[in-house]
Image (cartoon, rainbow, N blue to C red):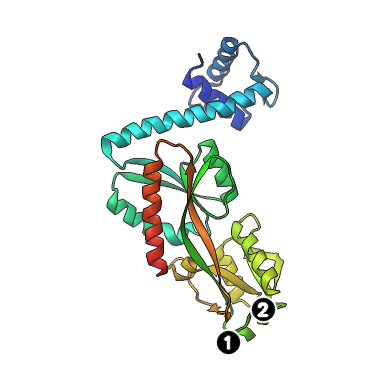
């Protein structure tokens, strides 16, 4: 039977497509990794790797690496479940979150988590939700916060809270001088957004279509701060999340809120983890604490 170490070597080579880098990740020499993979092939009676430059996985190798990744994830969860049984809520959780939410929610949420579970550690990784969902499915993340909808198969989705999205613009914008703003007043207005890889960009595009505004595609922010600053300079309007506007690290200096009569928008945030994980109860407890904290912040 294959050993866990051989499966680890195979997964590393599949992901890195380079013997040297795969060996470095696994903390072994390149000859050791190559020799162990050769033994695995001999034991199974199939070719898993075409040894060229760069090396390429055979179809059988790719499928075996996919299944090996699942096995290694399950083994790690067994180890962590045993640790949790001994120590309660303890250990390190690899936690993914979008940069349009994480910096404005997680600092205060972590204070509450640490107060209630001092032996629990969160390894926070910010990233694009679509990419992090793939990392979660591969076992590279344990859980994450993501805007809905989420359509990745094999994942448990736990809706947590709805966050208002606020229209903002510079204080001297013509809309800022109106006592009442109607949806039709947005027709033809330029709107800024963050990079298209973010779910918030797609939602902003949809809101522009609903209101008759147009999205500035030549001026896209790399962060919510850059979007706010461009809006404050008069380049366009922007839809910004409520938690960002309330946060010390965000804020609404240089822009003003432009409430629209009879119209509002929100985004839904969910916690996501793999279905049938051994640590689902732990993840559910973390998710509930974050949801309760977010609701308090938004109250």
Mark 2 highlights which residue? 186
On the image, the x and y values in percent for residue 222 come to: 60, 60
On the image, the x and y values in percent for residue 76 come to: 42, 31
Work out whether mark 1 precedes mark 2 in sequence or the reverse, and give the earlier one: 1
Res 20 → quadrant: top right
For the residue pair 81 and 168, the one nearer the viewer reads as 81
Residue occupying the point 54% across, 36% down: 138
- Identify the element where label 1 is drawn: loop
Q: Are marks 1 and 2 in contact (CB under 8 Å)?
A: no
Instruction: Say if 231 sits above or below 66 in the image.
Output: below
On the image, the x and y values in percent for residue 7 come to: 52, 22
Res 82 → quadrant: top left
For the residue pair 255 and 58, the one nearer the viewer reads as 58
Which numbered marker is on residue 75?
Answer: none
Which numbered marker is on residue 180?
Answer: 1
| Mark 1 and mark 2: Cα distance apart in space | 12 Å
Q: How many labels, in total?
A: 2
Residue occupying the point 66% across, 65% down: 206
The answer to whether one can see residue 206 in this image is yes
- Identify the element where label 2 is drawn: helix
The answer to whether one can see residue 173 in this image is no
Q: Quadrant of the C terminus?
A: bottom left
Residue occupying the point 58% across, 70% down: 239
Residue occupying the point 57% across, 81% down: 261
Crowding near the residue tagged with mark 1, few <14, some 14–19, many ≥20 C-alpha atoms within 10 Å: few
Residue 129 relative to residue 215: left or right? left
Crowding near the residue tagged with mark 2, few <14, some 14–19, many ≥20 C-alpha atoms within 10 Å: some
For the residue pair 270 and 220, the one nearer the viewer reads as 270
Instruction: Say if 214 sits above or below 45 in the image.
Output: below
Instruction: Say if 107 sits above or below 72 in the image.
Output: below
């Amino acid at each position: 039977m294959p050993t866990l170490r051989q499966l680890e070597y195979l997964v590393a080579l599949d992901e890195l497509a380079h013997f040297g880098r795969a060996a470095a990740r696994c903390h072994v020499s390149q000859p050791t990794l190559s020799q162990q993979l050769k033994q695995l092939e001999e034991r199974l009676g199939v070719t898993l790797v075409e040894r060229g430059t760069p090396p390429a996985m055979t179809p059988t190798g790719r499928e075996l690496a996919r299944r090996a990744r699942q096995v290694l994830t399950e083994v790690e969860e067994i180890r962590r479940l045993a640790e949790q049984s001994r120590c309660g809520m303890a250990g390190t959780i690899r936690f993914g979150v979008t940069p349009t939410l994480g910096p404005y929610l997680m600092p205060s949420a972590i204070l509450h988590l640490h107060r209630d579970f001092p032996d629990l550690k969160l390894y926070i990784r910010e990233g694009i939700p679509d990419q992090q969902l793939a990392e979660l499915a591969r076992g590279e993340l344990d859980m994450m916060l993501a805007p809905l909808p989420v359509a990745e198969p094999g994942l448990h989705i736990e809706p947590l809270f709805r966050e208002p999205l606020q229209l903002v613009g510079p204080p001297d914008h013509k809309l800022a001088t109106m006592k009442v703003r109607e949806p039709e007043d947005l027709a033809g207005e330029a709107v800024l957004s963050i990079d298209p890889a973010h779910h918030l960009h797609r939602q902003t595009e949809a809101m522009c279509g609903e209101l008759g505004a147009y999205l500035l595609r030549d001026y896209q922010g790399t962060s919510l701060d850059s979007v706010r600053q461009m809006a404050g300079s008069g380049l366009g309007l922007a839809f910004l999340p409520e938690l960002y506007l309330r946060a010390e690290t965000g804020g609404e200096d240089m822009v003003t809120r432009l409430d629209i009569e009879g119209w509002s928008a929100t985004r839904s945030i969910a916690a996501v983890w793999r279905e049938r994980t051994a640590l689902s109860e732990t993840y559910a407890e973390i998710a509930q604490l974050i949801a309760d904290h977010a609701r308090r912040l938004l109250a």
